[in-house]
Amino acid sequence: MEELDMVLLEAEDKMDKALAAYEKELTTVRTGRANPALLDTISIEYYGVMTPLRQVASITIPEANQLYIKPYDKSVCKDIERAILASSLGLTPQNDSNGIRLILPQMTEDRRRELTRSVGKLEEQAKVAIRNVRRDSNDEVKRLELPEDACKAALDDIQKLTDSKIVVIEELTAKKNKDLMSI
């Protein structure tokens, strides 16, 4: 039975990691409000090494629709500006020589709908990841050659765990879509 407990714990751990990855992905989807996580995917070349923006600058939110990036070393302002322009954010940085201001424009209804569709795709990817963990765990349980009732009980436990994680994914998606559609 110890092996069975390990399979269940491992399944839960992998599902939690898939859930955490989904939550992280959701933070990169822009809502109408400023969020420093929007810049998590941006890196700049700093002394010959690609470095995440958060390691070379502080990011603050002076207003609900603005981000202010203040580099620790002012010489990288132009590099940060170039990286933001090259990114898929679609924002135009305003360089004031001390830092960079990003003003997030109001989103159109079409853009909001497009973002809810992309959140739906992310949701489906997260659900698939959870289901893959379920499938692998079910295979592990079947390999253990347990008595039929113990095997069935373990498979039921894995299914309950899967269902609970999928409910969490759906709740996160609903919350994100509500944020996207609110003005």
Image: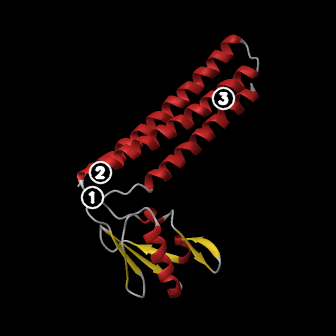
Tell which tag, 3 or 2, sits nearer the viewer. 2
Name the image quarter holding the N terminus: top right
In this rendering, the answer to whether 139 lies above or below 34 is above
Q: Amino acid at mark 3?
A: Ser
Circle nearer the N terminus (3, 2): 2
Q: Which residue is mark 1?
A: 107
Residue at mark 1 to residue at mark 2: CA–CA distance: 6 Å
Q: Amino acid at mark 2?
A: Arg
Name the image quarter holding the C terminus: bottom left
In this rendering, the answer to whether 38 lies above or below 139 is below
Q: Residue, x 49% and y 32% (percent of image)? A: 164
Label 1 crowd bin: few (<14), some (14–19), many (20+), radius 10 Å: some
Pinpoint residue 14: horizontal percent, then vertical percent. 62, 40
Q: Amino acid at mark 1?
A: Met
In this rendering, the answer to whether 155 lies above or below 43 is above
Q: Nearer the viewer, residue 16 or 107?
A: 107
Q: Residue, x 66% and y 30% (percent of image)? A: 136
Tell which tag, 3 or 1, sits nearer the viewer. 1
Residue 112's disc number: 2
Residue at mark 3 to residue at mark 1: CA–CA distance: 42 Å
Q: Residue, x 41% and y 37% (percent of image)? A: 170
Residue 12: quarter of image: top right
Color theme of the render: secondary structure
* Residues marked 3 and 2 touching at CB (< 8 Å): no
Circle nearer the N terminus (1, 2): 1
Q: Which residue is mark 3?
A: 137
* Residues marked 1 and 2 touching at CB (< 8 Å): yes
Give the number of marks.
Answer: 3
In the image, taking residue 30 as reference, residue 135 lies left or right, namely right
Residue 128's disc number: none
Residue at mark 3 to residue at mark 2: CA–CA distance: 38 Å
